[in-house]
Image (cartoon, grey):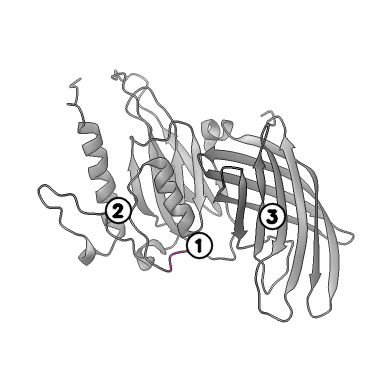
Amino acid sequence: MRTLPPGAGFRLSMTALLLAAAACAPKQSVPVAPAVVEPPPPSVSVEAAKKPRETRCELAQGADSRVETPFVAVVRDEAGYQALARQSGIVLPPLEAGFFPTGVVVAAFLGVRSTPGYRVSIRHEGETFRIVEEGPPQAAILAQVITTPFVVAAYGSGPATNFSVDPGERLGASLKHLGIVSGKLEVSGGILGRFGTFVLDGELRVASLGELTTLFVDIHGKSEDKTARLATVTTFSKSAEGRFAFALPNAGDFVPPPCRALALSGRIGGEGPKLFVNIAAGPCSASDAFSANGNIQAAPVDAPSR
């Protein structure tokens, strides 16, 4: 097998990244690379990235990032997108104003692999984004080269839609599991002034990359006359002390229309880590909107056996 000269792998991966970014941008806006000076990646237009989810807009894919541990991200705002670029070391193309909050960026990092030939992709199946890892043929004779395969893609997504992410067996095994120790959510409002208190249960899964944390949510609630569920995935930034604040566009079955967003804040850290979350209704100007107020405390649990 021919050995690539030093730095060739980086040049190849950067070329692939720029080609992928250019494919997502309007054809007339793709710059022509000069012979020496490399141009910045083109912007990804709102129209290009907000195609049906079956038609993804791939922003970057390759085998060289600085992410050496498995990680999955579901980014819902510009600050998270910039943090993803910082933590991964990937040159991501700018997204045009207006892409968020209805668009999402999904990224998957396999971590370190000891040979070339590994690849990761994202498939949309129903309301699930499935992370798929592909390895080299078993009979292949490969050089011992450290690679860190990754993919980053943009998808159109309605603000009222929750979706799940199947990280696959190996990425899924890297997630930390947290069980809800205590939790409640009080919901009131509407034209009739309804009120109910949900007792919360369920499990959370967590992945971390520097300042970023991805939270896989599967929360169940039960009140006197109703059951509810919230299942979704989101990535947020946290401070050095583990404090965070972010929004979820949809509260699942817990908060009725017209406004269903939730504002979450709290702290993650300590042994395990532990998670403390305060829950409130997102901002809404509708007179018949519901309010929400609650909290969750979660602690590490063993992963369920398969």
**Residue extending farthest left:** 35
In the image, the segment drawn in magenta is 98-103
**148 shown above or below 143:** below
Quadrant housing residue 116: top left
Answer with left or right where residue 16 lies relative to residue 161. Answer: left
Question: Does 102 lie within the magenta span?
Answer: yes
What is the C-alpha distance between the residues marked 2 and 3? 33 Å
Residue linked to disc 2: 21
Residue at (37% x, 21% y) in the render:
138
Residue linked to disc 1: 157
Query: On the rendered image, what quadrant is the C terminus found in?
Result: top right
**59 shown above or below 67:** below
Circles 2 and 3, Cβ within 8 Å, touching? The answer is no
Where is residue 54 drawn, in percent x and y? 43, 56
Dot 1, how many residues are within 10 Å of its Cα: few (below 14), some (14-19), or many (20+)? many
Which SS does the magenta portion mostly show?
loop
Res. 230 mark: 3
Mark 2 or mark 1: whose residue is earlier in sequence: 2
- Helix, strand or loop at mark 2: helix
Q: Nearer the viewer, residue 305 or 154?
A: 154
Residue at (52% x, 44% y) in the render:
212
